[in-house]
Image (cartoon, helix red, strand yellow):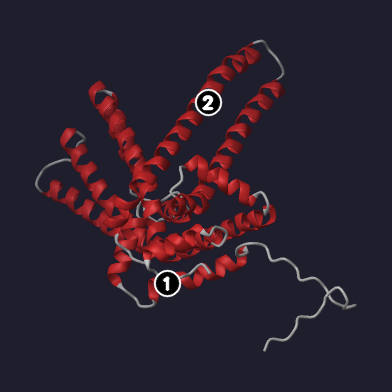
Amino acid sequence: MSLPSPNLSTTPNAEAPKARPPGLSPPEALAAAWHDTLRLLLRPLDARRWVKLSLICLFLGGGTPTAAFQWSLSSLPVNIKLSYILDQAREYVSRNLGLSILVVILGLALALSLLYLRAVFRFSLVDVLIKRDASPLPAWRAVRPLGESYFFWLVGTLALLGVTFSAVAITAFPYIRSTAAAGTRNLLVSLLLLALLAVIALSGLALALVIMLTDDLVVPLMYAERLTLPAAWRKLGQNLRREPRALLIYILLRLLVSVGVSVAVLFFLFPILVTLFSGAIIVAALIVLSLHALGGVWTWNSFTILLATVATLLLSGLLLMVLGVVGMPGQVFIQDFGLRFIASRYPSFQSVWRASGAPDRYR
């Protein structure tokens, strides 16, 4: 027999219960993502799962693991004279028009390929986190249309910004040049240059913030409801417009987590990089000494440039593999943080969970 509920209108000291905001708060989502990451990676510890997740996270880039990788690379206590090698190779390529065109085409193709892989693997990571099944090929097939939608938006946005910045620079440069030639005070020219640089810097920061929120919040929503990117952004904006404080706290926590991940990745990455580059320097020195012993001299020509390019690509591939393994836990944790935050606000994620058969993590 159930007891009658008290009449709050006749109780003098009764207070109406405070309405709980929908979804997890950013700190709650962060704590839940931490436990999810530990369960996924360490309970149990599965080497094959680590390898598959590292493959998925290899081309995500753009985040703090990449920044930590670049920081470690710049602080290596070695002198490999990369600038001299690059200057020599650039000078040789610039003398040949065909090689110059080929380098430009290959550079564009490489950049577009990396953006494409980044877009599709971002959805693959969300698929793995929801299903808790690290299978890159099935995930790739399932999310490729969504990834291609994200890829075209990303390429279009970057191209539009590039054209806009180029047009602004081309338009402003003659005016600044004529102002300086007319003997106008240098303060005006400096202010114009400063304003132009400020606009470019602020636009870059705004674009980085938009891409971060797209990766963290919009991509999971696109995956759960099979929306296009503009439609997902509109739906996310309608929801978060009612929770500006939660969004601000999420962004601040996300930046703090990124800094923490950078420090952790750097701690593990630096000694590995020192070992790899030391081995590469020893191998290069042995090759040069062997040539001298045989009476030969290392000179830059088509064959040696090709050989150096192949060696650089092999070393870069090895470094990317190391970066993928070391940076993977941070990528999983950050993505799951955004997934936890957004999934608790949309019932559609419950349907995705039921269809996947994975443990319910979003109730």
Q: Is residue 275 visible?
A: no
Question: Residue at 62% of width from left, 47% of height from top?
Answer: 238
Question: Residue at 48% of width from left, 34% of height from top?
Answer: 157
- Residue 47, compared with residue 189, is above or below; it is below
Drawn side of residue 137 relative to residue 60, left or right:
left
**Nearer the observer, disc 2 or disc 1?**
1
Question: Residue at 57% of width from left, 14% of height from top?
Answer: 174
Q: Check disc 2 and give the amino acid type.
A: Thr
Residue lying at the far bottom of the rendered structure: 1
Of residues 95 and 310, the one nearer the viewer is 310
Of residues 319 and 224, the one nearer the viewer is 224
- Gap in Å between the C-alphas at discs 2 and 1? 47 Å
Q: Check disc 1 and give the amino acid type.
A: Pro
Disc on the earlier residue, 2 or 1: 2
Residue 53 circle label = none
Drawn side of residue 55 relative to residue 173, left or right:
left
Residue 136 percent coordinates (x, y) = 29, 58
Residue 224 percent coordinates (x, y) = 45, 54
Give the number of marks: 2
Of residues 70 and 111, the one nearer the viewer is 111
Crowd class of label 1 (few under 14; some 14 to 19; many from 20; radius 10 Å): few
Residue 195 placement: quadrant:
top right
Residue 164 circle label = 2
Residue 359 circle label = 1
Q: Is residue 82 visible?
A: yes
Question: Residue at 75% of width from left, 83% of height from top?
Answer: 4
Crowd class of label 2 (few under 14; some 14 to 19; many from 20; radius 10 Å): few
Residue 104 percent coordinates (x, y) = 31, 29
Q: Secondary structure at mark 2?
A: helix
Of residues 202 and 20, the one nearer the viewer is 20
- Residue 162, compared with residue 25, is above or below; it is above
